[in-house]
Each structure stands twice: as C-alpha cells, then as structure tokens.
Amino acid sequence: MKLVDRTHEAQSRSATTDLDYAALFEATPSPCAVLGPDLVLVEVNRAYLKAAGRTREDLLGRYLFDSFPENRADPKTNGMENLRASLDKVLQSREPDTMALQHCEIPMGRPEVAQKRWWLPVNTPILGPDRAVKWIVLRMDDVTPLIKAIAPGDEPSIERAAEETELYARALELNHLNQELRLAHMREHEMTVTLQRTMLMTPDFEHHDDVAVRYLPADDSLAVSGDWYDLIDLQDGRFALTIGDVVGHGLEAAAVMGMLRSVVNAAARTLERPAQALEVLGLFARSIEGAMNTTSINALVDPASRLITYTNAGHPPPVLLHSNGECELLNQALDPPLGARPQHVPCSQAGRSYIPGDTLVLYTDGLIERRGEDIDVGLDRLITTLGRHSNHDPEVLADALMSDLGVGSGLARDDIALIVVGL
C-alpha cells in the first residue's frame, strides 16, 4: 500500500512541476539519440543532428548502422564496430556501458565527405515493467576540441592526447563505480544492522526498568555477530537470562545465533530447570553447521526466593556485584561449549542467593579478552571496574564497563554482548 501511495505522490509531483521533457531532451547540449531494442532510431535531439550533419527525416525510423555505415576507405576507423559491440552488451546486461574514447569519421551531408572526430559515447538502457530493454539512450560527448587543444596539428601528439583523455574518462568511470560500491556497502550495512536489531528484540525487556543491555560487533564484521542476549519473563515473577557466543563473525554467525537464541528462548519458557534448556540447546547445536563450540549461559532469577540458578556451557562466568563493591564469580557450574563432548552429557547447574541491591552482570568474552593476555587478567580488570562503579544504576554501569574496559579505544577485537540486571 505504501508503494502505491508513493508512486501516486511521485506522479503528482511530476504533474505539478509542468516540465516539458521533450523540450529538455531537445535542448540537451550533448548529442543524444533514442534507439529501440532493434537499434532503429526513434528520436534524436538538436545537438545530434548538428554533429551528424543530417536532418530528422534522414534518421528517424532507420536502422542506426544504415544511417552511419563504417568508413570503408579507412580500415583504422572502427567506431561503428565498437558502438555495435557496446549496444549488444547493453541489450544483454541491461546495464549502462561507457565506451572507450572513439575515433570515427562522421559523414557530413554526402557519403564521400567525412570529418574525423573524437567521441566519448555512453549507452544507457531504459527498462520496461518486465525488466526488458525498451529503449537505449545513446549519448555521444564530442571531445574533438579538447583533443585538438591538447595537441594542435601534430597527428602523433593527437593520438597521445586521445589516450590521455581516455584515461581521464576511465578514471571518471572508475570513480562512478566506486561510488556505486560505497552505496551498495551502505545498503548492506543498513540491512545487517536491521537484521541484528530484529533478532535481538525481546518484548519482555520493556517490563524491566532495571536491566541494561549493550551490543558491539567486532571492527572487521558487517555490524552483525554471533553474540546474543535475551530476557524471558516466566510465571510467578521469575525471569530467565540467556547470553551466548557463536564462533565467528558476520552474517553466517548471526544466522546461527538467531536459530540458537530462538531455541533456548522456547526451551527456557517450557522447561523448569535452566540446565534442561541448555541441554536442549546443545542437542540442537549438534544438528546445525556452524553452531558447534558455541558458549552460552542460562540463568533463572527468582525474586521471591532471591535465588539465581544458573548453568554454563563454556562461557565466561557471570558476576554478582554487591552494593559494597564486592564481586563474586558464579563459577560453580561449568561445562564445555555446546557439542564439544563426543557424546551428549547432561549439563550441571548451581544456585546462589542474592540480596536486594545486588547487580548481576552477564557478558561475552569480547568484553574481557585481549590478544596475548591471560583470561584471568581480563576477569580481574572486570571485577576492579565493577567494584569502582558499584553504586551506579544498570544503565550507567553498562556505559562505564564499555568505556573503562577499552572498548571505545579499539582494544577489543571480538564481538561484545552485555546484560546488567539490578536485583
């Protein structure tokens, strides 16, 4: 419906501008011709007629190469042959084609009289609703004055000037292609960011004002990664927290992440014990290419009993931050990453009580790991930072962690996901 509305708006704007497109085409300073897919001339502008030395009646309705045959007297002149190849390419690819600089002789009124000129032709297809080529716009920029200005009178110098001009034209074309690549990369980046944001959306986050999350992809990825976080509201005020890290970066890892996140979300809602949900995830990971060796944590928070029950498959341990700045690593349950064992083995599970005012922090290894550094050094740095900001709310604490641990300075080389929960 929106597409129809926009089309109508575009037509309305076009109608209100009162532009005479035929007059614009006629006044275009570069010689332009419109060809049908059969290469019959259907329209030409004034500049084209002047350059060709022909009348409209001489050209319209005629096959292009009957109107401008090859100059048989000069075997070195191959402009029409090159033009034919370019037009064939446009018909096949349905993409514009910028030709190399062409040296050809245009008949001037009589077939026996020809004038040597240099042209920079561009052939652009106009597609119909069925994506077939409906017309081809042939634009020929006459660069003969430029060539003669660079090398007046001297034929070898003219040839060199033509080469230099063609190099310049190729540079312009390359710059245009680079701009198209940049635009394509921007569109791909926007698509991947939207994909990641959609996959990480959880409506249950809206019910928790005391939860902060952060996500940051690795520098060399397309703004997507295999890291995830999730919060799942359960019965009786309980809620589950999951976080995980798929091996690798980019779209492939993000696709695997999306599947694993969905599976553990469903399992956490239907199974009583966190370890059971992670066992289901481990079995599923064995059937998905790229999911092996994923690390993950599933934690169940019960405000009524003030108990955190957690299970860990090869993931960095959660941290329980007390209001006095002391930190506890929740490392009493730790199993290998998903699928790392030859046979499926039930996951271990542990529990830890908390008091109101504590903060639970779950994160992926990109937050603490540094190349060439022992993981314990990173954990100590995390604990020190948490102790320094123990009196902050989850949002401020999350920002402090991302800042103080060097994430913004580019020290982190891996994807980062972070959940900070005020208990």
Image (cartoon, rainbow, N blue to C red):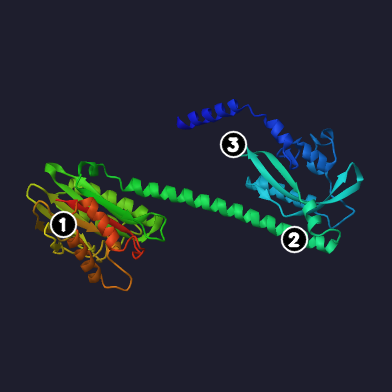
Tell whether label 1 touches label 2 (CB within 8 Å): no
Which of pointers 3 and 1 indicates the residue nearer the eye? Answer: 1
Which residue was labeled with disc 3? 130
Tell whether label 2 touches label 3 (CB within 8 Å): no
Q: Nearer the viewer, residue 24 or 133?
A: 24
Which residue was labeled with disc 1? 310
Q: Is residue 418 visible?
A: no
Q: Is residue 142 visible?
A: yes
Q: CA distance from mark 3 to mark 1?
A: 57 Å
Which residue was labeled with disc 2? 163
Q: CA distance from mark 3 to mark 2?
A: 40 Å
The residue that appears at 34% across and 45% down in the rendered structure is 198
The residue that appears at 83% across and 55% down in the rendered structure is 77
Q: Earlier in the sequence, mark 2 or mark 1?
A: 2
Amino acid of disc 3: Asp
In the image, residue 136 sits, relative to residue 288, either above or below, namely above
